[in-house]
Amino acid sequence: MTGVLDKLFGSSARVKIIRLFLLNPDTLFNLKEISRRAKVIPASARREILVLRDIGFIKQTKEKIDEIIRLKKGKIKNKKKKIQGLKLNQFFPFLHPLKNLVLNSVPFNKEKLMKKINSLGRMKLIVLAGIFIQSDESRTDLLLVADSINNSGLQRVLKDIEAKIGREIVYAIFNTKEFLYRLGMYDRFIRDVLDSPHEKAVNKLNI
């Protein structure tokens, strides 16, 4: 589906940026933040922003924020500061159908993703929830149980997915001993994840 959207919207960069704004409708972004969050080079991000602004999907706007100013003798003063940036236009005429089209599409190959994660350590349990199964009912998107894991490798994989989906992935990692202990103690977090909609991509613990 991702390839279809790329062709439909002209580029993968545009799809990433559209998804970023749709999933963060109240956030004011500048070019640097859009480029970083969507993992799109600044030149491409600038080009796509111009297109999206011209059609009215996003708008240039200003907002007031609280700025903390540190004075002498440790005193602190709050000051209102205006910042300028880009924000989703809630009155864009095709907003709702666009949401349905973009957010209901899975921007990654689940099988390839599982192969990447599975290669990062001795995985005993991989639970997919939240964004990975298009559900809002879980407290996490990904739960991993492994006795050894390449954390830097995992971060790279997740950052790549975050750029595609437009938001941060919520995940939890346990070793086998800790997980089984918490499971046996009816840990609230573990129970909530397992009682909510989820998929077990790897289940060597027979949970």
Image (cartoon, rainbow, N blue to C red):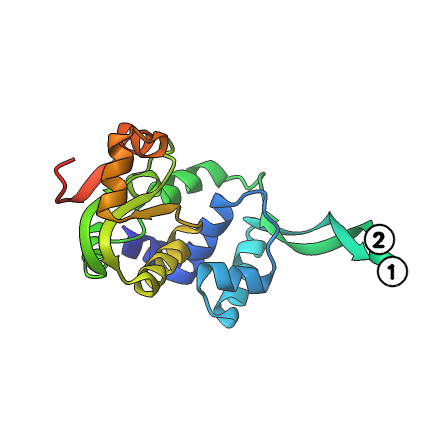
| Pick the front one: 181 or 135 | 181
Counting the numbered discs, the total is 2
Residue 203 horizontal/vertical position (percent): 15, 42
Q: Which mark is residue 159?
A: none
Q: Residue at x 32, y 51 (%)?
A: 107
Q: Secondary structure at mark 2?
A: loop
**Label 1 crowd (10 A; few <14 / some 14-19 / many >=20):** few
Q: Of all residues shown, which one is farthest toward the right?
A: 72
Is the C terminus in the top left, top right, bottom left or bottom right quadrant? top left
Q: Residue at x 39, y 48 (%)?
A: 169
| Pick the front one: 59 or 154 | 154
Q: Residue at x 39, y 38 (%)?
A: 100
Residue 45 horizontal/vertical position (percent): 51, 65
Q: Which mark is residue 72?
A: 1
| Pick the front one: 19 or 9 | 19
Q: Secondary structure at mark 1?
A: helix
Three-letter amino acid code at the position of disc 2: Lys
Q: Is residue 70 left or right of residue 106?
A: right
| Residues at marks 1 and 2 touching, judged by CB atoms closer than 8 Å | yes
What is the CA distance from the residue labelled 1 to the residue labelled 2?
6 Å
Residue 197 horizontal/vertical position (percent): 28, 31
Residue 180 visible in the displayed image: yes
Q: Is residue 37 left or right of residue 150?
A: right
Q: Which mark is residue 75?
A: 2
**Label 2 crowd (10 A; few <14 / some 14-19 / many >=20):** few
| Pick the front one: 120 or 41 | 120
Residue 48 visible in the displayed image: no
Three-letter amino acid code at the position of disc 1: Lys
Above or below 199: residue 158: below
Residue 40 horizontal/vertical position (percent): 45, 65
